[in-house]
Amino acid sequence: MSALLLGGCGASAADRDALDVYAASSLAEPFRELSEAFEVAYPGTDVRLTLAGSQVLRLQIEHGAPADVFASADPEHMQSLVDAGLVEAARPFASNELVVIVPLSNPAGVGAFEQLPRAQRIVLGTENVPAGRYAREVLLRASQQLDSDFATRVLGHVVSEESNVRLARAKVELGEADAALVYRTDAISSDLVRWVEIPDAMNVAASYVIGVVAHERGAQAAEQWVDFVLSEDGRAVLLRHGFAVE
Amino acid sequence: MGKRWPVLLLATPILGLLVLPLIALALVSSPVDLAAGMGDPLFAPALWLSARTTVISLAIVVGTGTPLAWWLAVAPQGRTRMVELVVDLPIVMPPAVVGIALLQAFGRSGLFGGQLQILGLQIPFTTTAVVLAQVVVSAPFYVQAAAAAFRRVDQDLLIVGRTLGQSSRGAFLRIAVPLALPGLVGGAALAWARALGEFGATLLFAGNLSGTTQTMPLAIYMALESDVRVAIALSLVLAAVSVLLLFALRAAPSAWSLLHSATLGRSPRGTRGEGAA
């Protein structure tokens, strides 16, 4: 009986090797596309994507999650895994920046970044998720360049802190929040939000890094995945989804 | 006796699974870690918010659930069946579904969002949303237990009470409620525990902000991303409260009957005096 059960679910895994790719939430669309292309290029490999806030994935890897590759939305979370010997070497592969998103109806009438304090209900990432940390950096710069209490006013209107950038976006998509700070790519991939640019002088360059997770299992497929992401084709996919690549 | 051992042996895995994680939770954290966790800025606001919101939600559940439970107990069964189904629904519904449904109902772009906005009310992202989520998920536990307790009350006693001059409200408050009290208290304790543990619906409907919507379970989830010790300290506190609650629940009926028999012991004068008043 148990052989029957095991046999039933093990059938597809037996002839295909699984590759577990842990990636920041904001990489959802390009990585889904890349995993389909990868499975065509390397038949016999089954790519399994785990998407969450980079800090959550880091924690999971620290606790022994069976990840083969980690793609982080900031170098810090990656570096702590490299320092701990859990990731071999990390390479930057894309970059992103923040925008302000508002619901299509734009109830708070935010038409420019300077008007962000008009939004009464603002959602950010937590201080641990890269998007939340970058957002606070942007607000800090705005306080220095625009108005010394800009950050205080905006943070005073924060109604929720989400554990990944896609959850922050969802609150705006649902029309519950007036505004959120998310990556440009998150804004592009949603047709339920409009976005407002953040001036370059106040914006941050979010650098995405990728690395192979160190463990006894063969790292060949993991290295192939990293090479694939860094290849011409991989960069084209990232570009198409709004990421900047060198 | 000899027959029972194999049965218990079969049950060992599930017993172990139920008990071992709790033992581990109690063992892994050193007092230093616990103190560090409790000193974290997330800890006190979450504890205080959980205490506040669960007391309010329990008051709402008991205040509105008691009449409902009474009606379920005394009305003809044909009429109560649909209502009973509705009351049980949140028990089988995944909390995440409850959260989304609450958003669709009371969110700004939800079914009643427009009307609420005219009244100047915004529910998502407020402490009110936390309370609403707790009420929805915990109410069934109280209403079910209360209805069962009321059903056990001998209706003849109420009729006797009425013939002795009690109003129906008086008969309910002075006869039905005291007789059903152990069941009501048990149900309230279960409902309170469920409200205290509410996570999914709160996260989706109320959001996550320390001091406003971040209850203990949400704080555990968020603390895990920054400092595991804080998550463990919060978990230990919640676990301790739950265990205490369970002991109180188990002890309550026997304590109640003890108290009751003690009262009965000096009943002759007591009841006569009350009857005269």
Image (cartoon, coloured by chain):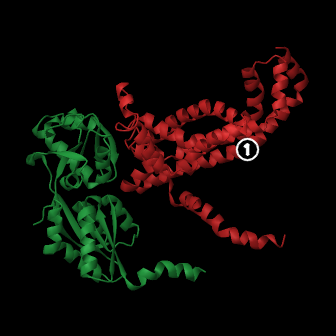
Chain colours: A green, B red
Q: Which residue shows up at 18% across the image and 71% down it?
A: A234
Furthest residue in direction bottom, as rendered = A15
Q: Which residue is mark 1?
A: B251
Q: Which residue shows up at 23% across the image and 34% down it?
A: A108
Residue B139: give x, y in percent of width and height: 58, 40
Asked whether residue B9 appears in the rendered view, the answer is yes
Residue A123: give x, y in percent of width and height: 29, 43
Furthest residue in direction right, as rendered = B268
Image quadrant in which the C terminus of chain B is located: top right
Residue A163: give x, y in percent of width and height: 34, 52
In the foreground, B65 or B238? B65
In the foreground, A157 or A13? A13
Asked whether residue A88 appears in the rendered view, the answer is no
Task: Give the vertical position of B252 relative to B120 (above or below).
Answer: below
Task: Give the vertical position of A18 relative to B48 (above or below).
Answer: below
Among the 4 quarters of the image, the one containing residue B66: top right
In-image side of A107 versus A114 (left or right): right
Task: Give the vertical position of A162 relative to B271 (above or below).
Answer: below
In-image side of B247 versus B267 (left or right): left
Disc 1 chain ID: B
* Structural crowding at the residue carrying mark 1, measured as other residues with C-alpha within 10 Å and reported as few (<14), some (14–19) or many (≥20): few
Image quadrant in which the N terminus of chain B is located: bottom right
Q: Amino acid at mark 1?
A: Ala
Mark 1: secondary structure:
helix
Among the 4 quarters of the image, the one containing residue A159: top left
Q: Which residue shows up at 44% across the image and 51% down it?
A: B220
In-image side of A185 versus A55 (left or right): left
Q: Which residue shows up at 40% across the image and 42% down it?
A: B104
